[in-house]
Amino acid sequence: MTPVLEAVGIAKRFGPTVALADGSLSVSAGETHALVGRNGAGKSTLVAVLTGLLKPDSGEVRFAGAPAPALSDRSAWRSQVACVYQKPSVVADLSVAENLFLNRQPRGRFGLLSRNRLRRAAMDLLESWAIPVDPELPAGALTVEQRQLVEIAGALSLGARLVILDEPTAQLEGAAIARLFDRLRDLRAQGVTFVFISHHLPEIYEICQRVTVFRDARRVLTAPVGELREEELVAAMVGEARGLVQVGADRPAVPAGAEPVLELEEVGVPGFVERVDLTVRRGEIVGVAGSAASGKRQLAEALAGLRPRTGVVRLSGRPVPPSNVPAALRGGIGYLPGDRNVDGFVPDLSVAENATMTIAGQLGPAGTVLPGRRDAVARKLIADLDVHTAGPHQPVSELSGGNSQKVVMARALASDPRVLVLVAPTAGVDVRSKESLLGAVDRETRTRRGALLVSDELADLCVCDRVVVMSAGRIIAEHPRGWNEAELVAEIEGIGQ
C-alpha cells in the first residue's frame, strides 16, 4: 500500500550545522506513527520540511505517492498536512468559529460576512468529527486540550487527513491526556493519520502503532511498537558510547562541609515548577536534566530574576527577592541564557561592550564607562576564555557561534559571581568550543564558586558532580558522578514513572 507520507533522504544544513543528514520517514494511512529522538536529533527540522516551511537541500517528500507541492502553494500544503504545536496558533480574541474559518468565512447577501452561516458551519464541522467544543467560545478561554482539538478540526476542514502532533500532552494532566487519546483513536477510526512526537515514551506504547527513531540527524530505526521493548527504544535513541567529552574527569570530590552558595527551598515557578528543594555548594557543579516540559529552563530563568517565583532562594545564606534581575546579579548570580542569538548578546555591540554589560557601573566614576578600563577587563576575559577575535572592539555579530558563546560566558563571569546558572552552555557550537566552554565551567568552579548547569546534552552533564532529573516541575531523581547514560535518558523520557 502506498504510504500517506513518505520522506526519502531529506538533508538540511544551516551553515556548518547539519540539521538533517538522512531524514527518512514512511507513514501508513490510518496509523498513529511515533517520531522520537533526543533533543537535537533532527525532528523539528524534519517537521518543518514535511509541512512545507523549509526547503530541503536534498531528498523528496511525497503525499500518497505524489510529489509535495511547491513551497509557495500554501493552500496545497494545508490540504495535505497540518501540525498542531505546543504553542497555540489560534487567535485568542476571536471565537472558535472565527478561528476555524479564518480568512474563509461564509458570506451572505451582498458578499457580507454571515455570522449565522459561520456558526452553523463551525457546528457542523465540530459535530462531524465529534469534537465537543462550543463554537461561540473565545479561543483564549479554551483549555489546552480543547485548543488542540480545535486546531485538528481546522486542519481537517481544509482537507488534510494527516496531522502532526508536537508534544500534545506536555501541558496536560492525566485525565486530559486520557480524553485526548480517546479522541485521537476516534479520529483514526474515521481515517485520520497522525504523526505523534513525544518525549514521554510510555505514551508511545499507549497510542502508537509504529515508531521511528532519529539520532544524530538520521533515522536509525522504524519498527512496530509492539515488537520493541522499552530498553531497545532507549538504546536506539542513545546509540553506542560516543566518547562523551570528559572535561573535568579529575575533579576532586566536593567536601561534605563545603559552603552552600545556592539554596532553594520549595521554589516554584507558576505554571512550570512545583516546590523544588536543591543546594549547590562551593566547588560543585549540579546538572539539571529533563524534557522540554520538565520546567528546568523556567527554573533557571526564575533564579536569574527573569520569571516570577515562589519559595526561598538564598545566595551564600542571603535571601534574594523574586523577579528582580539586579538583585540576582548583586546577590552573586552569573547567568548564561539558553539562546545566545535571542537573549545572549547585542549583535552590533563590540565584544568588550557585551562581555562587560553586567558590570558597566563599575567601569568608571558616577555611572560612566571608561573605555580603557572596559577594554582591559574585556582583554582578560578574552584571554581566559580563549575567544578568537580581532580584539575587544570587534562586533560580536562577526564572530563564529562558538566564540560568540564564549563572549556570553564572559559576561556571566565578569561580575565574579558566587554561582553560575548556565542554560544549554554548549548549544550549537563545535566540538572544540564545547570542550573550551566546559573547561571554563570546570576551572571556574573548582574552588571559587558553584554552578547549576541546565542542559539536554549528555556531554555537558558529564562535567557535573551530580545530576538531578526534573519531570512535570519536580525533581524525581538524583545521580552522582558516573551515572548510567541509558538510565538517565530513560528517566528524562518518562520510562518507569
Image: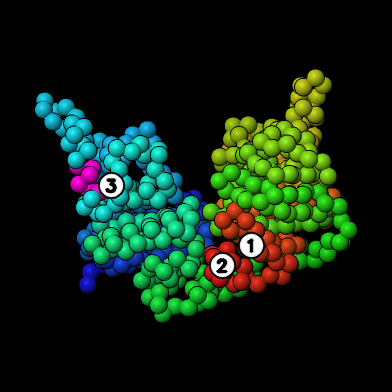
Which residue is the site of mark 3? 154
Q: Which residues are magenta?
A: 121-126
Question: Mark 3 belongs to which amino acid?
Answer: Gly
**Label 3 to label 2: alpha-carbon separation:** 34 Å
Q: Position of residue 319 (x, y in %)?
A: 78, 40
Which image quarter: residue 308?
top right
Please tell me which residue is depicted at 60% across the width and 53% down the height of the picture.
473
Count of numbered circles in the view: 3
Which residue is the site of mark 2? 497
* Quadrant including the C terminus: bottom right
Q: Position of residue 187 (x, y in %)?
A: 28, 60
Please tell me which residue is depicted at 69% across the width and 58% down the height of the picture.
287
Residue 476 has which mark?
Answer: 1
Q: Main secondary structure of the magenta part?
A: helix
Residue 122 drawn in magenta: yes
Question: Mark 2 belongs to which amino acid?
Answer: Gln
